[in-house]
Amino acid sequence: MVLNGQLIGEVGIYPRTQDPDDPVASTRELGYALGQEYWGQGLMTEALRLVVKDLFAQGITALWAGVFPDNRRSIAVLARLGFEYRFTAPLPAVLAHGENRAEAYFELSNENSPQD
């Protein structure tokens, strides 16, 4: 994400499998980050809204996003877009940097996506 010529955030789109025959091949996982000074302005909500619309138009059937359970702002962004909580899982040790961390996972299916 670029604002006034400055990089302020990013959205990543990741396949959930490499096997095209796997049922989750038509789904994606989203990751996102935004510079703290830009929080609370609706920028990430709008960016993700555009990404979601485009991915569903391409035939993606569901989107997933994992966030830290204490990241209330990120959870609120997902809720505004229609994502629903599914489960919480421990973060793999290699990603947790020695901490006991978990990630809450949210899903948005194409059929449950709010329409513009």
Image (tube, grey):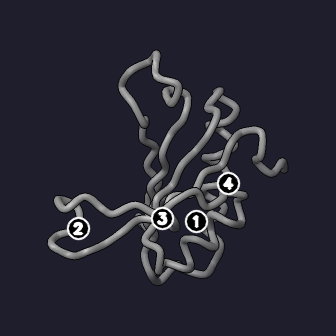
Q: How many marks?
A: 4
User: Sequence order check: which comes first, mark 1 or mark 4?
Assistant: 1
Q: In this orientation, which residue lies closer to the viewer: 22 or 47?
A: 22
Marks 3 and 1 close (CB-CB < 8 Å)? no
**In front: mark 4 or mark 2?**
2
Q: Which mark is residue 49?
A: 4
Q: Are the residues at dot 1 and dot 4 in contact (C-beta closer than 8 Å)?
A: no
Q: Is mark 2 on a helix, strand or loop?
A: helix
Which residue corresponds to mark 2? 96
* Label 4 Cα neighbours within 10 Å, binned few <14 / some 14-19 / many ≥20: some
Labelled disc at residue 104: 3
Whether residue 9 is visible to the viewer of this picture, yes or no, is no
Residue type marked 1: Met
Mark 2: give few (<14), some (14-19) or many (20+) Cα within 10 Å: few
Residue 63 position by quadrant: top right
In the image, what residue type sits under mark 3? Ala
For the point 61% across and 68% down, the residue is 43
Q: Is residue 4 visible?
A: yes
Q: Which amino acid does label 4 sit on?
A: Arg
Residue at image coords 68%, 66% = 79
Q: How far apart are marks 1 and 2 (CA)?
A: 25 Å
Q: Where is residue 2 in the image (x, y as percent from the top left)?
A: 48, 61
Q: Earlier in the sequence, mark 4 or mark 3?
A: 4
Helix, strand or loop for disc 1: helix
Report which residue position mark 1 lands on. Answer: 44
Of badges 1 and 2, the one in the foreground is: 2
How far apart are labels 3 and 2 at the CA level? 14 Å
